[in-house]
Amino acid sequence: MTYVIEAIGHVRGGRAAPTDDDWGQSRCIIELDAERFEPAALAGLDGFSHAEVIFLFDKVPPEKIETGARHPRGRADWPLTGIFAQRGKNRPNRLGVTVCRIVAVEGRALHVEGLDAIDGTPVIDIKPVMQEFLPRGTIRQPDWVTELMSAYW
């Protein structure tokens, strides 16, 4: 089945290239589509510390999409891992999801820090981070993930 999803806006500023690490200090603006959204669409978001941003890895060509398993970042010393056990950009639907810090809200512009998307990236949705939606209990992950993420933020 096919679904049509329109971008609500685009990332402006920040990084121009999708490098793998050091995203924590990256600042950018999510600019809502002025034809579809009034500034009121972001009203109240400034009361939250963080937002969850869903975006499209639009620069990944179809032939680069992964549907099976691979070694994360091509490292043979890390286990062969299925695409759904990774957060890489070469996903079947090319969707990225990141929790980032809200810096400011100005009209149709949401200023954020720590969004691992590049300038021009289509944004699919924005949701406020609410404590009650955060994971309950202990979070576990393989050691290779801890190593991979050590320089990410």
Image: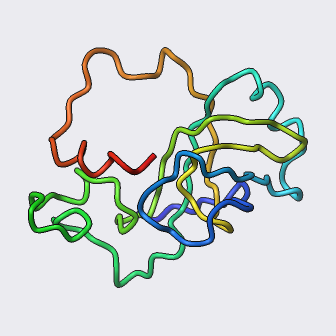
* Position of 61 relative to 58 (above/below): below
Percent x, y of residue 1: 40, 63
Percent x, y of residue 120: 68, 68
Rendered image coloring scheme: rainbow
The one nearer the camera, 84 or 50, is 50
* Position of 147 relative to 140 (above/below): below
- Name the residue at 90% across, 42% down: 107
- Name the residue at 77% across, 43% down: 110
Which quadrant holds residue 100?
top right
* Position of 109 relative to 128 (above/below): below
Extreme-bottom residue of the structure: 63
- Name the residue at 15% across, 42% down: 143
Which quadrant holds residue 65?
bottom left
As drawn, is 82 to the left or to the right of 115? Answer: left
Percent x, y of residue 70: 17, 67
- Name the residue at 9% across, 58% down: 79
Percent x, y of residue 135: 36, 22
Report the label total: 0
